[in-house]
Image (cartoon, rainbow, N blue to C red):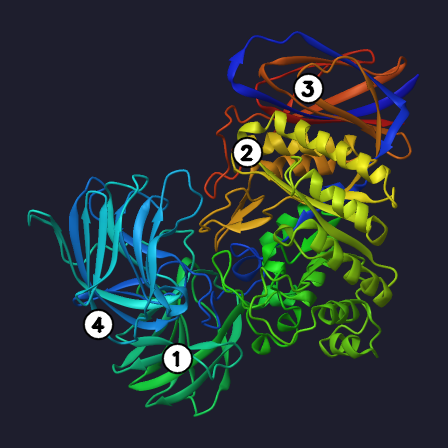
Amino acid sequence: MLRCSLSFSLILACLVIRGAGAGEITLTIHPDRVLNRIDEKVYGHFLEHIYHSCNGGLWGELVWDRSFEGGGGGPAWTQRDDLIAQEGGGENVRLLFGDPQWTDYEFTVEARKTGGDEGFLIIVRALNNREFYWANLGGWGNTGHALERGVRGQERWGIVGRRQNGRIETDRWYRIRARCEGPRIQFWLDDDLVIDYTDDGRGPTRGRAGVGTWLTQAQFRNFAVKSLDGKSLHEGLPPLPKQEPGVAPAWRTFGGAKASTITGNALNGDKYRQIVATGEWAGLAQRPMAVRSGEVYRGSLWAKGEAAGELVVRMVAGEAVLAEQTLPAPGAEWGEYAIELKPTASSDDAELQVGVRGPGTVGLDQVSLMPESWRQQGGFRPDLLEAIKQLRPPVIRWPGGCFASPYRWKDGIGPQHKRRPHPITIWDDKDVNSFGTDEFIAMCRRVGAEPLIVVNIGTPQWNRGVRGVDFLQEVLDWIEYCNGPADSKWGSVRAANGHPEPYGVKYWEIDNETWAMGAETYAEWVNRFAPAMRKADPSIKLAACGSAGYGNDRNGLAWNRVLIEQCADKIDYLSIHHYENPNRFAEGPRAYEAFFRRTGELIAASKNPNLKIYVSEWNAQSTDWRTGLYCGGLLNAFERCGDVVEIGGPALFLRHVSATAWDNAFINFDHRTWFPAPNYVVMKLWRDHYAPQRIAMEGDTGPLNAVATRSADGKTIVFKAVNPSEVVAAVVLKLPEGVKVEAKLELVAPGELSARNTLTDRDAVRPKSAEVRREGSTLRFEMPPISCGVVEIRCE
């Protein structure tokens, strides 16, 4: 008698309406009938620089916006005497106050820009972060004034009315008045009417008032709100938001220091921060940081200027000084000052202070700090690196996404203090390129993944204003940096950066989401770039951008048809994207699977029938249990379509919990810890039970989305399924006669579609052991609504 030990992998999803059982679903598995091969790269991942996944996350640098380029960080509101100040460098920073029921009113305030790129945001009728009006005074690079409006059902706000030329000067107080009267919205700047708009009925008719900034530091005073009949609704400074755990770190001043962002003459980027101190001890501070006693924190800062006393770096927690170091007073030119701090106690809410004793004017740039134990392990944050490693990704795509399209790879190599920032502010950050090519490949080596690099080909949409750059040569240089010998031009640069052996990067993608170009134009670019890239390294494999979604429109199947007809013989993969409504966790995977098949038919009739599909961005847009159910269903579709789908990669991979959008990430973190979303839980379960050959399965699957697989030697059989019905299903699995089975079932049964993990309850959605009944070579089990599990047949 053949004896096997069986571990069984199954996901069941039921809708919120629960009912009686659906009757038995009987399936017979035929291990001897292999239907298709499944490449393990369908369990790949995609690491984009988005919402501090790398800068402020995976890379172990503790300081956010270390080069003061205006990237990242939450609001840094402070109050002193008769004013409030916003001293952070982030975009879309708002402070709202008042009653959401306010309708018609006048709001007056005085504002002064102290540094940065733009002017002020003066907000009225704000119901939430999506429904509001704001006067953007000195917006668009400090070139104009306009009213912008956010409305219900609209993803992003936009200009309404006319935009006029104008700018906001630094260190000048402006008097600002806003008036809301019925559909009419007006704004005055120093008694000049600059905005006068009558709404079309779509905008909010009530809401709070507020102020804000965009890549700018500013001060506000003399707040007053009155009804149109003169009744006082608010007077005085509004209350400041409390900084909670999980918030994004941001720079602020302390000790009465005045801070301004200076453009030009910076150490390595475009900007630096200047502090003017008049008291005994003043400067810049950033919190929260998680620090531990017994750890050594090393880094450096760059400074220049004049000061009566020394520079001082501190770690504090409340009133307690955890560590302190005195540095020499700065000179007239930029100089580097080494930091070494050894905190005497641990804190999850520590603050880093960088200041000067006595009066002085000091410029700061490139403030960097990292735990020494992290540095010795490659510079990565250990818990996030381990979270990636646990998924065992066979391949990781990088650096984007939209981030890749304007990315200049040469700005992200070499010594950290010489690296230039990313060209644009995107995804809540102006990335300082701390995590570049060498760091990415080192990370891939540590987690056992093959690197896949997306190159910038110079698309007009993302590279406006860039002059004198040969983007094809940039791509060829990047290939040589990664794969060329140490005596080649760019291979020698790699060697000088400490990596003499070629990296051997096999997978390359020709830009990202190029739909704005049109399929025909992009195909022309692919036909120009691909041969040159293969000539630079004949061993590489190339992917070209494919469809968005699974429709038949110009960016769907029609796009794929053009690329396949014109470029199939030049590429190895067609890279397609789709993000699903999480309410379609049941039907979404089936619909996308049908699209794979339609695209596969185009490939089969092309000049390159060996071309494969790469689903390089996929997910359901949530972090509740629906996204876990969608994940299981789509991974089953990948396995069923293994003859045409070879690589996958969901997004987002990592996301700081302060992010303003895209709440769908697998790994969600703050400065202290992280939690896995349901898609992480399900994909890890599926990945842990990957088997490379899909085998035949006979019977009516009913509501189940099911697949059966086996190992290459036939000694392991795995069954995976998703049940998106309204009722509990009773499942009967029949194995070949004569097989004696020992079965184990693990379930993920959170109980509700709204179930989710959080920073404080990271295991609400997780696997648990459950019962499987054995009757000879037959298995029987019941799955509770919305649940998930694992059974593996290992034949002796």
In the rendered image, the quadrant that contains the N terminus is top right
Q: Are marks 3 and 1 in contact (CB under 8 Å)?
A: no
Task: Give the labeled residue for mark 3.
Answer: 704
The label nearer to you, 4 versus 3, is 4
Helix, strand or loop under label 2: loop
Instruction: Find the residue positioned furthest to the bottom.
Output: 332
658 to 341, vertically: above or below: above
Choose the circle earlier in sequence order: 3 or 1: 1
Q: CA distance from mark 3 to mark 1?
A: 64 Å
Picture coordinates of residue 756, whole percent (x, y): 50, 34
Q: CA distance from mark 1 to mark 2?
A: 51 Å
The label nearer to you, 3 versus 1, is 3
In the rendered image, the quadrant that contains the C terminus is top right
Helix, strand or loop under label 4: strand
The amino acid type found where label 2 is placed reads Asn
Q: Are marks 4 and 2 in contact (CB under 8 Å)?
A: no
Q: CA distance from mark 4 to mark 2?
A: 47 Å
Helix, strand or loop under label 1: strand
Choose the circle earlier in sequence order: 1 or 4: 4
| Residue 507 seen | yes
Choose the circle earlier in sequence order: 4 or 3: 4
Choose the circle earlier in sequence order: 4 or 2: 4
Q: Nearer the viewer, residue 734 or 27?
A: 27
Circle 4 Cα neighbour tier, 10 Å, few/some/many (<14 / 14–19 / ≥20): some
Task: Give the labeled residue for mark 2.
Answer: 581
The label nearer to you, 1 versus 4, is 4
Q: CA distance from mark 1 to mark 4?
A: 32 Å
512 to 607, vertically: above or below: below
Residue displayed at 70% across by 55% down: 521
Q: Are marks 1 and 4 in contact (CB under 8 Å)?
A: no
Task: Give the labeled residue for mark 4.
Answer: 173
The amino acid type found where label 4 is placed reads Trp
